[in-house]
Image: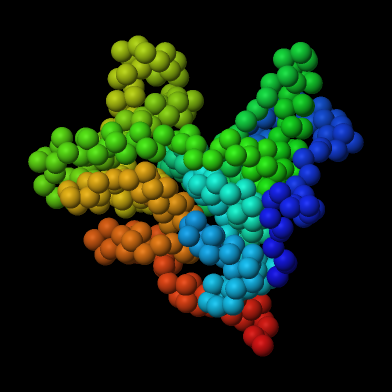
Amino acid sequence: MSSPPPDAGSPSAHAYPGRHHGMSPHKIGLSIERHRASPEVSLEQYRRRRVHAFGCSLMTRKAVYLDLRFWIGLRDAARYDTPGIMMDLLCALHGAVAAGQVFCPITDSTFLEMFKQADPGSRAATAYLISELSLGATLLTYDMRVGTEIAHYVHAARTPEAVDPLRELVWSKPAYVMGFVDPVPMAFDPATRLALRKAFFDHMWEDVTLIQVCDMLGDKFVHADPLRFRETTGRVNEQTRTHADSLKNMKTAYQHELVGVLNLYAGQLTTILAPILPSEAGPLPKKGTPERAEADRQCQAFLVAAFGTEAGRKALRTLHINTTLHAAVRWNKGQALKANDLFDFQHACAALAYCDAFFTEGPLCTLLNRPDLGLVEQFGCFVSADVAACLAYVEDVVRETTVYDGLKPT
């Protein structure tokens, strides 16, 4: 196991790997020239190829998702060399990652929660540990995963043999943990501009680490609320109080949540469906017109129907998991939604949908394992808040993988 980084602000704080922000002009130049030779490949196509290739490279490993409680516990064990069960788990995870058996991805929610740590030294140590255990793997942002799932569901229904497994299509890198950015250098001709954009993507994808992203943001991002979770919880709690009498059971609560959520994504489905509709359907109506509103309404009805089937709920998994958790809170009429609940729900959406295990805190573990919700059973994800049980899970993965490879455990 590698040693923990020094505290940020100490004389050697910038000595550990990943803190240098410079880019190699030679490497960038080679990337530009390579992309000039393939102007027929759009930035979006190129980006999808790299996402898919990275996703494929991760598929031989178990994905173990940690919430911030576990990241902080593991960080402190490493930082202070504290013996005990958390140190045992840290050593097991390091060994499993080094042996090619496990990786511990993060999401935009994990990244944002890191900045709840106002102390830059603690934040840097957390980022360093994440960089080691994640292999630089993040999941696409919540909205991008939803869009990917909708597109995959539509295309899989038409040409199932032509779509790649969904789990290979949802991974990203630390530079894009909050979504893809694309500076457009307007002063160049279209071919050069495209090559520059793809070369910039290569640099961000390959060379920018989580540690660097945290350094660049610094303290300005501490306690930021870019997802507006505080505002959202106030609005949701007010709506819950207003409509409490109309909720007769958990199923009704789920349907109420579903219609509201799908209203946000109906337009996305309309855009996805437009290119594959028969020519007699005509062009996609412009946004803001009555015709577009009707098209969106029909697409929303299509999505609602999809959630009426087991296959649809599993395919559109991120929305299904999130809707189920929100419905559970709404049905528990005495419970008010808190901003931290939204972080928890987004962690759960990522972990259950795309990971093999989720190490989390007690209340969320209890909620996810409720038999009436059926989430753990549906997605086959190990969920636990018990550190000893989590350690046993990692040890089992190591043992099973070692035997599978034809080697006897020592």
Q: Is residue 185 above or below residue 158?
A: above
Residue farthest to the right, as pictured: 26
Name the image quarter holding the N terminus: bottom right
Q: How is the image coloured?
A: rainbow
How many numbered circles are shown? 0
Q: What residue is at 49 percent from the left and 25 percent from the top?
A: 275
Q: What residue is at 68 percent from the left and 24 percent from the top?
A: 183
Q: What residue is at 35 percent from the left and 59 percent from the top?
A: 364
Whether residue 50 is visible: no
On screen, residue 370 versus residue 241, left or right, reads right
Percent from the top left, x then y, of residue 398? 60, 76
Q: What residue is at 42 percent from the left and 72 percent from the top?
A: 386
Q: For this rendering, which residue is in front, 261 or 390?
A: 390
On screen, residue 45 versus residue 85, left or right, reads right
On screen, residue 67 versus residue 217, left or right, reads left
Percent from the top left, x then y, of residue 228? 41, 34
Residue farthest to the front, as pictured: 10
Name the image quarter holding the C terminus: bottom right
Q: For this rendering, which residue is in front, 14 or 189?
A: 14
Whether residue 188 is visible: yes
Percent from the top left, x then y, of residue 133? 63, 61
Percent from the top left, x then y, of residue 208? 72, 43
